[in-house]
Image (cartoon, grey):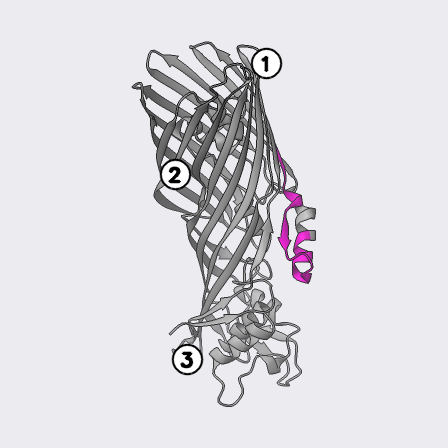
Amino acid sequence: MKKYILLSALGIALGASAQDISDVLRYSQSNINGTARFRAMGGAFTALGGDLSAISINPASSAVFNNNQFGVTLSNYNKKNESSFFNTYRDSKETVFDLNQAGAVFVFYNDDHASPWQKFTLGINYDIQNNFTNNTLAAGVNPYHSIGDFFLNQANGVALENLQTLPNETAGQLYMYLGENFGSRYQNAFLGYDTYILEAVQNSPNNTAYYSNIPAGTYEQSSYVSSKGYNGKLGFNIATQYDDRFYFGLNLNAHFVDYNTVHTFYETNDNPSNTSGETIREVRFRNELYTYGSGFSFQLGGIAKLTKELRLGLSFESPTWYRLFDETRQSLRTVRESTTTPAYFNDGIINVYPEYKVQTPMKYTIGGAYVFGSKGLVSVDYGIKDYSTAKLKPSDDPYFISQNEYMSEVLSVASELRLGTEWRVKNWRFRGGYTYEESPYKNTNIIGDLRQYSLGLGYNFGATKVDLAYSSAKREYNQSFFNTGLVEAPKLDAKVNSIFLTLLFEL
């Protein structure tokens, strides 16, 4: 039977990262998803409108529609992650099918033909901002640090009496007590001590210093991270057209988060045995994180036809205010040289954290487009987002204060460039796009810049349209397995090839 406990102290869960900078970036960044036409043209629609997914970046886009429209998009992602860790190379793959987008726009014309307000539109559109289904594998021989260094960093400073069970007290009961009263750092320290990774320097209740039973030398390490879930946005839109030149719109957005990740870390060694105490040969550390919640944001936008051919678009996206909940579960298994019986902690205890909040950065976007009559068009968007302004809340929590200060130091202003084009040959549409997005970090070695290329094809049957798009994106990452102790980071090249199919119907 699973046991649930509520952690009163917010802090580092999973022995890795939870309720920290990783959460902010996970929900602050979004992919160029949506309709196939939107994806094929690199999402450069701020000045164009007239597309269901364009509404998600500029709410004035719906006022460009002349007729009611309904659309649905299916997608296929092929994700490949190539890792390098101390000259050992691994790769992992994942294929994901998804209902990526669904929406509708309803157009209402003004019967008063003398009024400059020609029409208004109502729209609703759902887009997957991020599909989190993915897996990564990294492995190699680490000559510097062991998983024991992580547990040492967690345990040093913790009194030994907090890590030893009382008479008639089980390991699971002590683990729960530590979580409820001291937080996850103490739980990690207990896991290391309970499975013989750690040894107290002095066998005294007041001892606060420890050493590792994992002998010095080199360590064969592997890390496998499997994640799934999504971050979706449901937008409610209202827009209007003034005269023949101006369009204005507003979006009210509901956001949904469902994210699950499992990190399994495995380490072995054949280093010379310790002269005293235990010698640990194998460690298997498993951490699970489940995050769920919801959020709200709004957007304002406008489009102006400066000339018959030239258009300008502006949009503002507010921060998204998320209310999130975390649940974590851990297990740890070690094998000692002195016995064939493993030490194992796996009581199935689920740590339930109090509600916390994430405030993502706001975003400004400007776009321009030139329309060559009925032949085709080119468009460009430029967006800017200051990631250093993101916040974890409650803002008076001491842990969140330190995390917010850290984010303001290491995150930066990131710009985004989107280019798109479309050309018409009879009923056929030929499209292409390019996207460049800067890293949210000042140090781009942690997360690199994003580059994405796309192509698309469409056919207009009249009241029905079919669009197809292909895109290829690449980004590099250098992120450590743990945020303390074992800090060596594998290099990860993440590549995503995607196919989108959209069916559109004019109603």
Q: Is residue 72 in the magenta section?
A: no
Question: Helix, strand or loop at disc 2?
Answer: strand
Residue denoted by label 2: 100
- At mark 3, the secondary structure is loop
Tag 1 residue: 306
Residue 284 on image: x %, y % = 44, 66
Taking the image as shown, residue 158 lies to the left or right of residue 31, namely right
State the image coordinates of residue 44 (x, y, percent, origin top left): 51, 25
Q: Is residue 481 visible?
A: no
> Magenta stretch?
384-404
Q: Quadrant of residue 375?
A: top left
Crowding near the residue tagged with mark 2, few <14, some 14–19, many ≥20 C-alpha atoms within 10 Å: many
Residue linked to disc 3? 339
Q: Residues within 10 Å of mark 1 (few under 14, many from 20)?
A: few
User: What residue is shown at x 43% (from left), y 25% (from top)?
Assistant: 107
From the viewer's perspective, is the residue at label 3 or at label 2 nearer? 2
Residue 400 within the magenta-colored segment of the rendering: yes
Query: Where, quadrant-wise, is the N terminus in this rendering?
Result: bottom left
In the image, residue 407 above or below residue 271: above
Residue type (three-letter) at the residue carrying disc 2: Asn
Q: Residue at x 57, y 65 (%)?
A: 150
Disc on the earlier residue, 3 or 2: 2
First in sequence: mark 3 vs mark 1: 1
